Amino acid sequence: MNTLKTIYVALGSNLGQKHKNLENSITKIYEKVGDVVRVSKVYETPAKGFEGNNFYNACIEVRTRLEAEHVLKSLLEIETEMGRSRNQSEGYANRVIDLDILFYEDEVINSKDLTIPHPELHHRDFVLFPLCDIAPQFLHPVKNESIIDLRKHLEADNNIKRINQTLEPRPIEISSINYLCIEGNIGVGKTTFAKMLSEDLNFKLILERFKDNPFLPKFYEDPKRYAFPTEMSFLADRHQQLVDDISQLDLFSQFSIADYDLYKSLIFAKVTLQDQEFELYKKVFNIIYRDLPKPDLYVYFYQNTERLLTNIRKRGRDYEQNIEANYLDKINQGYIDFINAERRFKTKIIDVSELDFVENRQDYLEVISKIFND
């Protein structure tokens, strides 16, 4: 999973409802590229290099997981969707929307299709004035000067002026949940999603430490022999972690997201243990689960078994490669039975079988909407 990158994008429009065009482009950038966390004031400037209408210009700060080339591809798609047609021979021309990547972190990129930093930005008042609103101290990685210092080099007789209309940022917005649990079958992507959401919303992240279980690889090789020590090891570790991470947490002042709830221990144990072993396990479980804090919302990511097996093969953990479809089906049914019977806290089931929330931001936003708004 790519971590968040900070990028700066210049917006311009000189056709139609110019301010509305800028607003619409921000919405589309939010949907396709990433959170729009800062927005400059809007400036009006005359067309340069050709006879045309005055432009409305602004700059935005965006946090994205996309690589620079993918950002460029998405911005070109947005321009096309909004009605811009490009003609390589026409040079400068009137346009509904113009979107340019100015900076991608502090990287310097020179490829066939993309040059970053934008090679002309230090000459352009319609870029430097709005960029100064949101990143005055950002250091140009080639010029080695801050944006505010670059602006000082502009000619004094520029024709730029600020207009009264404003633009709004577009971060992810959610309803208030202090403690969110994301659960799901093996390979569904719950941990990846929890990491992404924690990063975007600054949630405290609580991840299951499954890699530390010394019995897990042995269990996949010989389930009958190693089922009980595996499940007891998971139970002890999960309980200790939740005591450390949640019982010590002020749930009224700090948001938290976990990629598991302790009840999963009982679900897996019911599938893997013999009857007598399970009854003993259940007694221990009920004692330690009773007093643990419960999530405000428990979300189960459902995914069909075929897709789960594909994901498991793709992530390539050797000890998981012999997991059978029947085992995943039983785990899934265990979760469904638990959710249908649960009355202590709010639960949701979200089918993510046809969604790719890692590679497709629109799918990611759809899942967030289903969690917090549906």
Image (cartoon, helix red, strand yellow):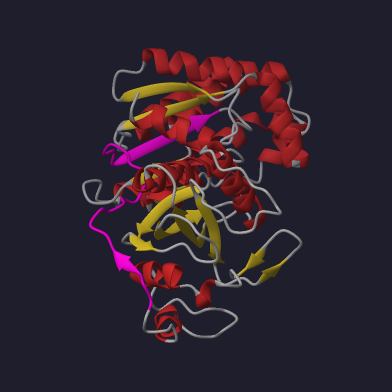
Q: Is residue 358 above or below residue 286?
A: below
Q: Is residue 106 above or below residue 355?
A: below
Q: Report the number of discs.
A: 0
Q: Main secondary structure of the magenta part?
A: loop
| Camera-nearest residue between 94 and 22 | 94
| Camera-nearest residue between 271 and 197 | 197
For residue 61, what is the image quadrant? Answer: bottom left
Residue 91 horizontal side relative to residue 24, left or right: right
Instruction: State the image coordinates of residue 315 (x, y, percent, origin top left).
Output: 72, 41
Q: Is residue 170 above or below residue 273?
A: below
| Camera-nearest residue between 168 and 273 | 168
Whether 324 is among the magenta residues is no
Quadrant housing the C terminus: top left
At a point 55% along the width and 58% down the height, the residue shown is 100
| Camera-nearest residue between 28 and 130 | 130
Residue 178 horizontal side relative to residue 55, left or right: left
At a point 36% along the width and 23% down the height, the residue shown is 347
At a point 55% along the width and 56% down the height, the residue shown is 3
For residue 78, what is the image quadrant? Answer: top right
Magenta-drawn segment: 158-184
Instruction: State the image coordinates of residue 350 (x, y, percent, origin top left).
Output: 47, 23
At a point 68% along the width and 61% down the height, the residue shown is 114
Residue 216 horizontal side relative to residue 47, left or right: right
Residue 273 visible in the displayed image: no
Residue 201 visible in the displayed image: yes
Whether 174 is among the magenta residues is yes
Q: Is residue 53 above or below residue 27?
A: below
Instruction: State the image coordinates of residue 70 (x, y, percent, origin top left).
Output: 64, 50
For residue 371, what is the image quadrant? Answer: top left
Instruction: State the image coordinates of residue 238 (x, y, percent, origin top left).
Output: 47, 42
